[in-house]
Image (tube, grey):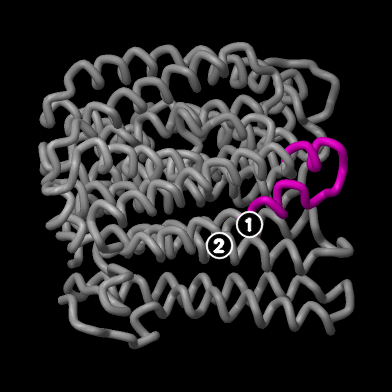
Amino acid sequence: MNEMNENPLDLLPEVFLGASAVAGLLLGSWLPRHRQWLVAVLGAAACAVGIAAAGVAAAGDPMTAFDGAFAIDSVTSTARIVVLGGTLLVLALGLTPFRRAARETEFYVLVQLTALGTLMLAGAQNLLLLAAAYLLASVPSYALAGFRKDGPGTEAALKYYVVGALLGVVLLAGITVLYAAGRSTAYPLLREALPGAPDTVVAVGLVGVLAGLLFKAGGVPGHFWVPDAVQGSSPPVAALLTTLPKIGALAALYRLVAAAFADTGLPWPELVAVLAALSMTLGNFAAFFQTDVKRLLAYSTISQVGYLLMPIAVIGRSQQAQTALLFYLAAYALTNLGAFAVVCALPHARSLDDYRGLLRRHPALALSLIVSLLGLLGTPPTAVFLGKLEVFTAAVDGGFAWLAVVAAVNTVASLFYYLRWIRPAVSDGGAGASRAVARPNAVLACAMAVASVILGIAGGPVLDLLSGPLAG
C-alpha cells in the first residue's frame, strides 16, 4: 500500500530507540556517576520493547509509512530484530569497561543513535531518507571510534571519519544523479523511470550510492577504514562497528537494487558479484598474518561482506536470494558478536599469543571462542554454516556458479587464520594475559556461542519466515 501514512506507530521500534537515546542523555546529566548504568538499562528496555514491536509488525502484511518513504516488510522486520538484539548485546558488553567512566552515559546514547540510523537505513525506500539514515548511522559511530581519546582511538576516529566523509559525498552525488535521471527519489517511481533514462547517467548514480553503502558495510572499495578503526577502538565499539552498520547497509542495498534497479539493463549483478569476490579474497588473505586479534577480526568482517553480497548479486535470478541474505545477516551478527564478547571478556589479551593456555584456565570461554571462530568459518552445526549453504545455493541457482567456487576456496583459505587463533588457545603455557576475565562478558560469550549452535540446528523454521515480499 502506497497511500499517505504518517502514523508514528508504524515506526514503533525506531521511536522507542530514539526516545530512549534522548531520555538517556537527559537522565545521565542528573544521575551520579555510580548510577549511570541506569541509562544502559533504559536502552536495553527500549531494545527489548522494540524487538517485541518488530515481531508484531512482522506478522502483518507488508506496508509503507510516511508516503512510501519507509518500508515495513520481511527485510525491515529482520533487520529490526537483529539490530536491536545486537544493540542490546553491545550495551551489555560496554557495562564492564565503561562502568563509572566520566562519559559512561554518552557511550550508551551514541550506541543507540548508531543503531537508530542503521534501522532507518534498513527500511529506507526513498533516496532522501537513505541519505539522512546514512548520516545518522555514521556521525555517532565516528565519536564512538575515538571514544577513549587516546592515540589509537583518535587515529581510528580520524581515518573512519575521513573515509566516511569522502564516500558520503560520493553517495550524495550518486543520489543527485539518480534524481536527475528518474525525476524522483521514491524507489517505486525510480523503477518506472530509470529504464528510460540514459544508461550512463543511471550507472554513475548507482556506482555512487553503491560506494557509500559499501563503506557502511565495510566491503571493497570502501573497506580501508575497517582494520585501523577496529584495532584502535575499544572492544565493545569494535563489535558494534563490524556488525550493526553492516546489517543496515546491506539491507538498504538489497532494497535499492530490488525495488529501483530491477528493470534496468545495467549489468549491476555482475558488478556486485565482482565486488563480492574482491571483498572475500582481500579480507581473507589480509588476515593471514595478523597477530592482533581485533585487526584479525576486522579483516574477517571484510571477507564476510563478500559472502553477504552474493545473494544481492542474484536478486531476481534466484528465489532464495532474500532468505539467504537475511538468515546470513542474523547468523553473522550473532557469531561475530560472540567472538568480540570473548575479546571483551579478556581486556588485556591483545595478541594471539596472549590467548595461550586459555582452554586450561577458562575452558568455557575457550570453547566459546572456538565455536565463534569456527562459526565464522562456516562449520556445522553453527548458524553461519546454514547461512553459507543458502548463499552458495542461491549463487548457483542465479547463474553465478563461478562466484560460489570462489567463495568455497576462500572459505577453505580462511581456516588458516582462524586456526592460528585457536591453536594458542588450546595450548599450554603463555604469559598469562588471559588470566584476568570480565565475567559478565564471558557469560555473554558463552550464551552467544550456544545461541549460534541452536540457530544452526533449528534454522529451518526461521528460513520459512524470511521469504515475504517487499513492500511497495
Magenta segment: does it hold 151? yes
Percent x, y for residue 125? 30, 63
Report the side of 211 relative to 428 (left or right).
left
**Residue contact between numbered discs 1 and 2, judged by CB atoms under 8 Å:** yes
Q: Nearer the viewer, residue 107 or 222?
A: 222
> Which residue appears at 27% of the width and 78% of the height?
67
Mostly what secondary structure, the magenta segment?
helix
Q: Residue 120 carries which label?
A: none
> How busy is the neighbourhood of tag 2: few (under 14 within 10 Å), some, or many (20 plus)?
many
Could you tell me which quadrant the N terminus lies in? bottom left
Report the side of 20 relative to 292 (left or right).
left
Q: Mark 2 points at which residue?
A: 136
The region drawn magenta spans 139-156
Q: In this picture, is 86 found above or below 215?
A: below
SS class, disc 1: helix
**Amino acid under label 2?**
Leu
Percent x, y for residue 4? 24, 84
> How busy is the neighbourhood of tag 1: few (under 14 within 10 Å), some, or many (20 plus)?
some
Report whether residue 454 is seen.
no
> Which residue appears at 82% of the width and 49% of the height?
148
Q: Which of 373 and 68 is in front in this view?
A: 68
**Amino acid under label 1?**
Val
Report the side of 422 relative to 59 (left or right).
right
Percent x, y for residue 280? 41, 23
Report the side of 135 relative to 95 (left or right).
left
SS class, disc 2: helix
Q: Which of 108 and 117 is in front in this view?
A: 117
Magenta segment: does it hold 240? no
Could you tell me which quadrant the C terminus lies in? bottom left
Q: Name the residue under label 1.
A: 139
